[in-house]
Amino acid sequence: MIEKDEAIVIRSVDFSETSLILTLFTKRFGKIDALAKGGRRLKSSFESALDILSQISVTFLHKKRDVLDLLTESKLIKRFHVTSDNLSGLYGAYYVADLLNLFTEPDAPNEKLFNIAAQTLVQLEQAHSVNYFVARFEYNIMQENGTQPTLHICAECGSNIDNKNVDNKNIDSVNNDNANVDGMNVGDANVGGLNIAMAGQPQKVRRTNARERIPFSFLSGGVICDNCAEKMRNNGQMYKPITPFALDMLQHFANENTTKNNETENVKNITELNDNTMLEILNLTNNCINHQLGTRPRTQKWLQKNYPE
Ligand SMILES: [Zn+2]
């Protein structure tokens, strides 16, 4: 049957001297693999609209499962513009395409995910807060997959975990441990309009203490309570203590209405985000993804980050 749809080109493989096999994430049909006969020719009916990361409108012959669809026409809606000073944005975009391929099945349409992905590509093109938009997309794709980490209740026993009630007694104690979040001031604590429990101390550099951290288990799939963390410790199992800032940001990703046009506000707030916090969040979402896939996506290592593994 002949279909028309919008699509993002997420993969492109040379098939012959003149043809390509494309993996497209389409708005209404989900992921499809399609043969573009003559797609490698400069003059073809595809108008050079088959580059990876391009958003295109396509006409294709939709076939049964396990048979390649046949692309008959394509028109460019939007190309991903690359400039030499936006390599991190480009790598982020390749990673988004990779995740779309790895997290979706053929013939499983998800229009919301299509819109989120299209929006994320636009944001990455602007080379602004790349780590933020990559981490948010990672959270969103897990959410659409129904495998996002739990953030409010213990992933082991289901008891409530409230990061707003984190013990703040040691807020100004400068401890020798490496748990310090340096250079974090109150302005940084307002993440996406959410206040973290530390208001009323303007201009004071905040140093977190290890005790303020929340245990997070990739194996259990989210935050865990102190009791469960202790059990895990006793059993020799690993978990990761995360800062209230990181948890708050993940909760922000979870709550945010992605269909609402609130990007301007978000961008404003994330410029205040401390680099270390952003890297902590990216590290966290990267590891959630890797844990779920059982492998590290090839494109993940191209992301710009400078934290120790
Ligand atoms: Zn628990």
Image (spheres, rainbow, N blue to C red):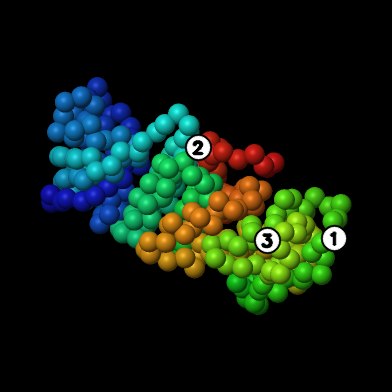
Q: Is residue 144 above or below residue 99?
A: below
Residue sitting at x 20%, y 24%? 42
Residue sitting at x 73%, y 66%? 201
- Residue labelled with disc 1: 173
- Foreground mark, 2 or 1, reads 1
Pick whichever of labels 1 and 3 is earlier in the sequence.
1
Measured in 3D between alpha carbons, the distance from the residue under mark 2 to the one under mark 3, in whole angstroms, is 28 Å
**105 sits left or right of 287 in the view:** left
Work out whether residue 50 or residue 203 is closer to the camera in this orientation and state it.
Answer: 203
Point out residue 267 in the picture as x, y percentages from the top left corner.
49, 54
Point out residue 228 in the picture as x, y percentages from the top left corner.
73, 70
Q: Can see residue 124?
A: yes
- Foreground mark, 1 or 3, reads 3
Rendering quarter of residue 70? top left
The numbered mark at residue 154 is none
Pick whichever of labels 2 and 3 is earlier in the sequence.
2
Measured in 3D between alpha carbons, the distance from the residue under mark 1 to the one under mark 3, in whole angstroms, is 16 Å
Residue sitting at x 38%, y 46%? 122
Query: What is the three-letter code of the residue carrying label 3?
Result: Val
Query: What is the three-letter code of the residue carrying label 2?
Result: Ser
Query: Crowdedness of circle 2 by 10 Å Cα count: few (<14), some, many (20+)?
Result: many
